[in-house]
C-alpha cells in the first residue's frame, strides 16, 4: 500500500517512494549529491548554528579545545563511572598532534574543564556542564531549523534520515 501525504493544497509526496527509488538505483551522481548536501549543510550552519558558534566563542573555546571536550564527553565510562582517555587515544580522537593536544589540555585544565593525571584525561563537572549547555543549544538551533522548513521538506528530511540510519529515533 502506498501512502500519500497531502502537504498543501495541490502538493503531495509519496511516503518514502522517491527515496526508495533512489535507494534501489545503482546510478547515483555522487558529485551532484555532494553539492546538494553541501548546500543543505551550509543552510543548516548559516540558519541554525550561528548561535551555537557564538556560544562557543563566548565560552572562549578554540577548535582544538572543543574537539577535546567532545572526545572526552563521548568516551566510555572507566573505573568509578568516570570517563577518561589516554593522552594518545585523546590525540587520535580529537585529530590533534601530541603537542597541540598538550597545549589545549593545559588550557582546559587551567579553566577547570579537564583534569589529567597519569597520562589520562577526563572531564570535570565544569567540562560536563559546558558540553551539556552546548548540546542543548545545538539541539535548540537544529529544532528551530527544522521548524522553519515546510511540512513537505520536513517529511522528505525525515524519510531521508530514516533511510540513512534507523537508529536516529532511539538516540536522545
Image (cartoon, grey):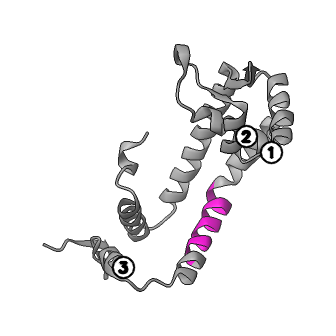
- Quadrant occupied by the C terminus: top left
Tell me which numbered mark, 1 or 3, is placed earlier along the sequence: 3
**Would you say the residues marked 1 and 2 are in contact, meaning their CB atoms lie under 8 Å apart?**
yes
Residue 45 shown in magenta? yes
- Quadrant occupied by the N terminus: bottom left
Q: Is residue 44 above or below residue 95?
A: below
**Residue at the disc numbered 2:** 91
**Would you say the residues marked 3 and 2 are in contact, meaning their CB atoms lie under 8 Å apart?**
no
Give percent across and percent down for residue 43: 62, 67
Q: In 3D space, how far apart are the residues under numbered discs 1 and 2 (Cα atoms)?
A: 6 Å
Relative to residue 13, is residue 78 drawn left or right? right
Q: In 3D space, how far apart are the residues under numbered discs 1 and 3 (Cα atoms)?
A: 41 Å
**Residue at the disc numbered 3:** 22
**Residue at the disc numbered 1:** 97
Q: Residues within 10 Å of mark 1 (few under 14, many from 20)?
A: few
Residue that appears at 55% across and 21% down? 78
Tell me which numbered mark, 1 or 2, is placed earlier along the sequence: 2
Relative to residue 89, is residue 26 drawn left or right? left
Q: As rendered, which of 148 and 90 lies closer to the eye? A: 90
Choose mark 1 or mark 3, whichever is in front. 1
For the record, the magenta segment spans: 36-48
Amino acid at each position: 500500500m502506498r501512502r500519500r501525504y497531502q502537504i498543501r493544497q495541490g502538493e503531495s509526496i509519496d511516503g518514502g517512494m522517491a527515496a526508495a527509488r533512489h535507494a534501489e538505483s545503482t546510478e547515483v551522481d555522487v558529485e551532484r549529491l555532494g553539492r546538494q548536501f553541501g548546500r543543505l549543510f551550509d543552510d543548516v550552519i548559516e540558519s541554525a548554528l550561528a548561535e551555537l558558534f557564538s556560544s562557543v566563542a563566548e565560552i572562549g573555546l578554540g577548535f582544538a579545545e572543543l574537539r577535546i571536550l567532545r572526545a572526552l564527553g563521548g568516551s566510555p565510562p572507566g573505573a568509578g563511572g568516570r570517563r577518561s582517555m589516554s593522552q594518545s587515544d585523546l590525540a587520535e580522537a580529537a585529530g590533534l598532534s601530541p603537542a597541540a593536544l598538550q597545549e589545549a589540555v593545559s588550557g582546559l585544565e587551567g579553566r577547570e574543564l579537564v583534569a589529567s593525571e597519569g597520562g589520562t584525561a577526563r572531564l570535570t563537572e565544569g567540562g560536563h556542564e559546558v558540553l551539556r549547555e552546548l548540546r542543548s543549544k545545538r539541539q535548540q538551533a537544529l529544532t528551530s531549523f527544522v521548524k522553519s522548513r515546510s511540512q513537505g521538506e520536513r517529511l522528505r528530511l525525515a524519510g531521508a534520515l530514516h533511510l540513512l540510519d534507523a537508529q536516529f529515533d532511539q538516540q536522545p
